[in-house]
């Protein structure tokens, strides 16, 4: 399995770039790395740039990744997650987003990095919210 994970701290979120092969196992590794970085830096918002991260998971593997691995690692560490997919990998049915939201995770998928960053920062821009 060849997967590279680069995590950078930004003022209001962690920026995670993932490249290489996308499998259920590499997905689990990314989830664990993101949760550990959130705890280490005290940041709960995450942007995952998956535009260079291989082909999408199968529906079955994606469901397992969200329902088991996300739910084991993310509660209490990740409050909001944005995932940016390559245009060829973007799922117009938004299955990933739907499953995550059904499990109570505030997650959205995007085609463009700027839109993802804007969505992550939304609550910080509202009046009365620090």
Image: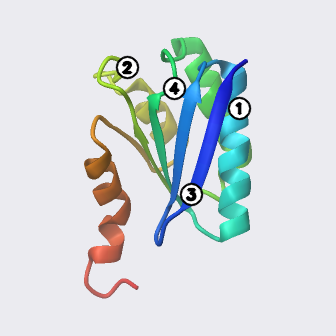
Residue under label 3: 8
Counting residues from the N terminus, which is met first, the one under dot 4 or under dot 2?
A: 4
Question: Do the CB atoms of the residues marked 1 and 2 lie less than 8 Å apart?
Answer: no
Mark 4 and mark 1: span between their CA atoms?
A: 14 Å
Could you tell me which residue is drawn at 73 percent across and 43 percent down? 32
Residue 12 or residue 71, whichever sits in front? 12
| Residue found 72% across the figure and 23% down from its top | 25
Give the side of residue 111 with respect to residue 79, left or right: left
Q: Secondary structure at mark 1?
A: helix
What residue does disc 1 label?
Answer: 28
Q: Is residue 51 above or below residue 57?
A: below
Closer to the camera: disc 4 or disc 1? 4
Q: Is residue 4 above or below residue 75?
A: above
Find residue 51 and report its image quarter.
top left
Disc 3 + disc 2, Cβ < 8 Å = no
Q: CA distance from mark 1 to mark 2?
A: 19 Å
* Labels 4 & 1 near each other (Cβ < 8 A): no
In which image quadrant can residue 97 be found? Answer: top left
Q: Residues within 10 Å of mark 2 (few under 14, many from 20)?
A: some
- In the image, taking residue 35 as reference, residue 98 lies left or right, namely left
- Secondary element under disc 3, as helix, strand or loop, is strand
The numbered mark, 3 or 2, whose residue comes first in the sequence reads 3
Is mark 4 in CB contact (under 8 Å) with mark 2?
Answer: no
Q: How far apart are the alpha carbons under marks 4 and 2?
A: 10 Å
């Amino acid at each position: 399995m060849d997967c590279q994970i680069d995590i950078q701290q930004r003022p209001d979120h962690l920026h995670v770039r993932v490249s290489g092969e996308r499998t259920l196992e590499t997905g689990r590794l990314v989830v664990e790395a993101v949760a550990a970085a959130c705890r280490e830096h005290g940041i709960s918002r995450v942007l995952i740039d998956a535009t260079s991260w291989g082909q999408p998971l199968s529906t079955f593997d994606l469901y397992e990744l969200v329902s088991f691995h996300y739910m084991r690692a993310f509660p209490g560490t990740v409050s909001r997650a944005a995932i940016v997919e390559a245009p060829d990998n973007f799922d117009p049915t938004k299955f990933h987003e739907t499953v995550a939201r059904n499990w109570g995770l505030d997650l959205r998928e995007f085609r463009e990095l700027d839109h993802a960053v804007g969505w992550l920062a939304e609550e910080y821009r509202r009046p009365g919210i620090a």
